[in-house]
Image: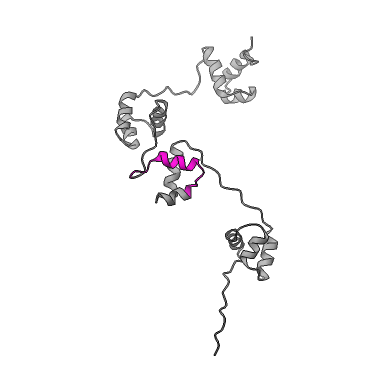
Amino acid sequence: MPKNNLSLPQIYFDYGSGMSCQQIAYKNGVSSERISNVLTEAGIEIRGTTPKKELPMGELIADYQSGVSMRDLTRKYDADPKTIRTRLKEAEVYMPRILKGDLSATEIIADYQSGISINRLANRHNASYATIRSILVEAGIEIRGRKPKKELPMDEIIADYQLGISVPKIAGKYDTDHKTIRTRLKEVGVYQPRRRTLPKRGM
């Protein structure tokens, strides 16, 4: 009988004919993991799977907790960084390293998840944007996307600007900030810093 409305004979046939688990999963509207489990339960060997690398986890965990770097761990145990991190996470001992001083990556992650931007975190901790971002990525934190670019009627804005209307007034008219107006005008090559005219002193 089909298992959960899946035609098992058809799945076996498709896989034997050369289709991948992903292709069969897409065809049946299920996950590739489910197809893989169905085939494994039937005693069918999954193509292209690499056996899990054996690692002395007790020793690996002890080294990690004593402060051995990820680079040194990969060299010592002849494994790539992703494998080392995955095994440490599975053992529930992996934590991003301390950045510097008393500043921990855990604090950075908590601040980011509370809504603070990467740029603000970089400024706060006197670190580069790339450093903060790498800590978040290494910890598996999803990086928030930037806000979509605001739609503005650039033809009208350019016309207003060329008529001599100030940037702050244009920003107010189009419900945005003056920095955005300046940036957009620079992008189209029409922005020119306005010179302030000082009142003439009396003779």
Q: Does the magenta-highlighted stretch encompass residue 107?
A: yes
Q: Is residue 199 left or right of residue 119?
A: right
Image point 68% across, 70% down: which residue? 163
- On the image, the x and y values in percent for residue 56 come to 32, 23
Q: Quadrant of residue 22?
A: top right
Which of the pair 56/9 is nearer the observer?
A: 56
**Residue 165, percent from left and from top:** 66, 69
Farthest top residue in view: 1
Q: Is residue 46 left or right of residue 81?
A: right
For residue 158, which quarter of the picture?
Answer: bottom right
Q: Nearer the viewer, residue 49 or 71?
A: 71
Q: Residue at x 42, y 41 (%)?
A: 107
Residue 121 is one of the magenta-drawn residues: no
Residue situated furthest front in the rendering: 202
Residue at 64% x, 24% y: name it. 29
Q: Is residue 193 above or below residue 45?
A: below
Q: How was the colour assigned to the protein in this rendering?
A: one colour
Residue 20 shows in this picture: no
Q: Position of residue 164 (x, y in %)?
A: 65, 71
97 or 71: which is nearer to us?
Answer: 97
Q: Quadrant of residue 162?
A: bottom right
On the rendered image, what quadrant is the N terminus found in?
top right
Residue drawn at x 67%, y 59% is 174
Quarter holding the C terminus is bottom right
Vertical side of 52 occupied by 109: above or below: below
Q: Is residue 15 above or below residue 165?
A: above
Image coordinates of residue 73 in percent, x first then y, are 32, 33
Q: Which residues are magenta?
A: 101-119
Question: Which of 104/62 is in front?
Answer: 104
Circle count: 0
Query: Is there any visible trace of residue 57 in the rendered image?
Result: yes
